[in-house]
Image (cartoon, grey):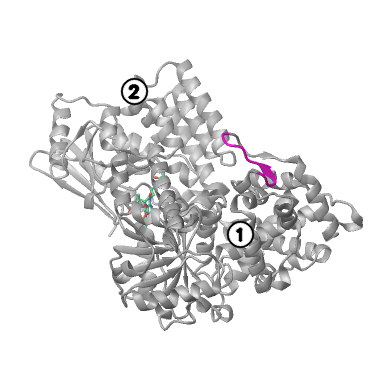
Amino acid sequence: MAEVKMEIGNDGVAVITISNPPVNALAIPIIAGLKEKFDEANRRNDVKAIVLTGKGGKFSGGFDINVFEKVHKTGDISLLPDVSVDLVVNTIEDSRKPIVAAVEGLALGGGLELAMGCHARIAAPKTQLGLPELTLGIIPGFGGTQRLPRLVGLSKAVEMMLLSKPILSEEGKKLGLIDAIVSSEDLVKVSQLWAIGIVEGRKPWIRSLHRTDKLGSLSEAREILKVARQQARKTAPNMPQHQVCLDVIEEGVIHGGYSGVLKEARDMKHLVLSDTAKGLVHIFFSQRATSKVPNVTNVGLKPRPIKKVAVIGGGLMGSGIATALLLSNIYVVLKEINSEYLQKGIKTIQANVQGLVSKGKLPRANADKVLSMLKGVLDYSDFKDVDMVIEAVIESIPLKQKIFSEIEKICPSHCILATNTSTIDLNIIGEKTTSEDRIVGAHFFSPAHVMPLLEIVRTEKTSAQVILDLMTVGKAIKKVPVVVGNCTGFAVNRTFFPYSQGALLLASLGVDVFRIDKVITNFGLPLGPFQLQDLAGYGVFLATAKEFVNAFPDRTFKSPLIELLVKSGRNGKNNGKGFYLYQRGSRPKPDPTVLPIVEESRQLTNIMPGGKPISVTDQEILEMVLFPVVNEACRVLDDGVVVRASDLDVASVLGMSFPAYRGGIVHWADMVGPKHVYASLKKWSQAFGNFYKPSKYLEERATKGVPLSAPAVSSTASRSRL
Ligand SMILES: C[C@H](O)CC(=O)SCCNC(=O)CCNC(=O)[C@H](O)C(C)(C)COP(=O)(O)OP(=O)(O)OC[C@H]1O[C@@H](n2cnc3c(N)ncnc32)[C@H](O)[C@@H]1OP(=O)(O)O
């Protein structure tokens, strides 16, 4: 239950405790409770000093993000209480009695801001301290933009806020954010003594907002902010909160902390209503919702331990998957068909691990231990005690069928039989076995040890236990598992197939390929469709295209362009020459010599109206590439391939790097408006054919004014593949 308690000890110290499991979020009743208890403590004659702490080993995960969601749904900004001035400045910082924060576990966002309003901070070891508000599209709103620079210095504070990077209490102590670190058991006791120390004048009574000693000179401050602004323009070009955060910090540096607090409160409220905040808050909750899968996570099943996994195939995917498992202390048996391929696979894993060491992401000392958990094999003898097999061989149906019949016999009966196929129907892969209940798709995205998404593909026969086990392994290896149904391309590849198709069609209509890529990267995807094709490899593209043409012949656009590129000796990044030129040590450069090949492809498709290139705005280019993706997302929703629309948003962000601040593909389409998407597709389908034909789902929702993300109505729910 959400509550704030106060206990007054014989020493005259009131201990105020926030209790709102699981993370002690500062929900509205908690804020009201804090105000009430602080007022009471200040009034009472038997209270000399106050300690503020959180129950259950966590100080606070910050302001209740659900309130932002409510503001987004209602548009009612008055739902946000005045915490910054009323509670943090007037009640806490200007309290007549000293207040010490006893922080443990985590103090994030509003949690850290409350602590910074107190007159001292005592922390347990390894407590996370941070202001991650920018990841939600807002800025700190309880005075954090003013107090953090005053406690840790401007440079560090800017870094912590702009990168939303938490620090541990040990670093906090060195920086001056934390006054002392004591064990968790002694935390409240020491904080009480510290508070009495302030009353008795043995410890300083510090109001952070009044400090200026760590801000440096005005010119130094301006220089730091100038550099930060330049960096933010590069790293977060489409998001307003970074520049606003720096403006608010500057206000406090120039006109004083209180003036900064007032500007912060005003600007925070504006930002809460921004599309960026709507998108990012949506993704925050959507990502957490993916852990809730009906009939899997709510039926009392317990995940079984997965300690040893066999990976079949040491190519790019297999070695990436093996790396991810090893990094999470799971034993891996890597199987290949000959020692040459096996050595290649092992070398790739070693290089992956080494790469993490050189980037500082893995301590050098851990690298040997990680690699010692790997065993390379050429036969199945080590498969007798594995808990899971992940097959990652080439996309060949007979080969996969053979492998699954073999492993079914060799592996223990509890062993999960997973495939990393990205296109082949799981029912076909499992057809020749009697183990279809333990066959599941574990679809990783390349590079598998880096990309965060794991699509878990289930068939009608996959057991709930197997899905739960794979979800648990997925989380253990730091992926975000999203459970999806079985269909060509599953959720992500199916939804995004029209991404490259739309781009190829536009190129055939006479639009410059590099302009298309630029428009898409300006929108926020890291790579345009042509550069993405270069990177993914043309072989993969052609093989996938074949699958899609077979599965959805009514809506595929057949372009000869990639085949022409291959014929002319281009192979994308693989051989350094695609739409772009790839040279070691320099950024990919658009290659103008590819343009005659694009022209040849145009002549062959011959779809330019009147033989002339169409004239389009950048906005039209964007929509002609992304609306077909939205259209396919609608079909994916209609077919029940995902549990909920927001799962597709998360999958698009984590699997395709669709900008999180646009909320994922379905959320974005709802912001743009289904009516506009529908009308545009209809217009283009009349001009350019079936590729653009709006789906029934889109048509229905656009005409009825129902958001694309609204839960399915019963007639479509019956088609669910989950
Ligand atoms: C005005 C102020 O400046 C504005 C703010 O304070 S904005 C809030 C700033 N704080 C944050 O951004 C922190 C957000 N939370 C997190 O990063 C992580 O949840 C965490 C590090 C606290 C804990 O992570 P982890 O242990 O993996 O648990 P996680 O699954 O994320 O969260 C547990 C539950 O708490 C909820 N939760 C976490 N932080 C929350 C918050 N600030 N408000 C509301 N709910 C929150 C999650 O939604 C989840 O709910 P569910 O179980 O119903 O799905």
Residue 361's x, y, as percent?
38, 41
The first of marks 1 and 2 along the sequence is 2
Residue drawn at (50%, 20%) of the image: 223
Q: Secondary structure at mark 1?
A: helix
The tag on residue 211 is: 2
297 versus 625 height, above or below: below
Residue drawn at (29%, 33%) of the image: 172
Give the Cα separation between the discs numbered 1 and 2: 59 Å
**Does any atom of ligand 1 lie closer than 8 Å to the CB of label 1?**
no
Tell me which secondary structure the magenta stretch mostly adopts. loop
Left or right of 571, for residue 271 = left
| Quarter residue 550 falls in | bottom right
| Quarter residue 116 falls in | top left
Residue 18's x, y, as percent?
26, 49
Magenta span? 577-585
Q: Amino acid at mark 1?
A: Val
Residue 552's x, y, as percent?
67, 72
The crowd level at tag 2 (other Cα within 10 Å; few <14, some 14-19, many 20+) is some
In this view, the mark in front (1 or 2)? 1
Left or right of 565, for residue 245 = left
User: Number of marks in the image?
Assistant: 2
Magenta span contains residue 579: yes
Residue 475's x, y, as percent?
37, 59
695 versus 11 height, above or below: below
719 versus 133 height, above or below: below
Residue drawn at (37%, 25%) of the image: 153
- Report the front residue among 272 and 682: 682
Q: Amino acid at mark 2?
A: Arg
Pointer 1 residue: 540
The crowd level at tag 1 (other Cα within 10 Å; few <14, some 14-19, many 20+) is few
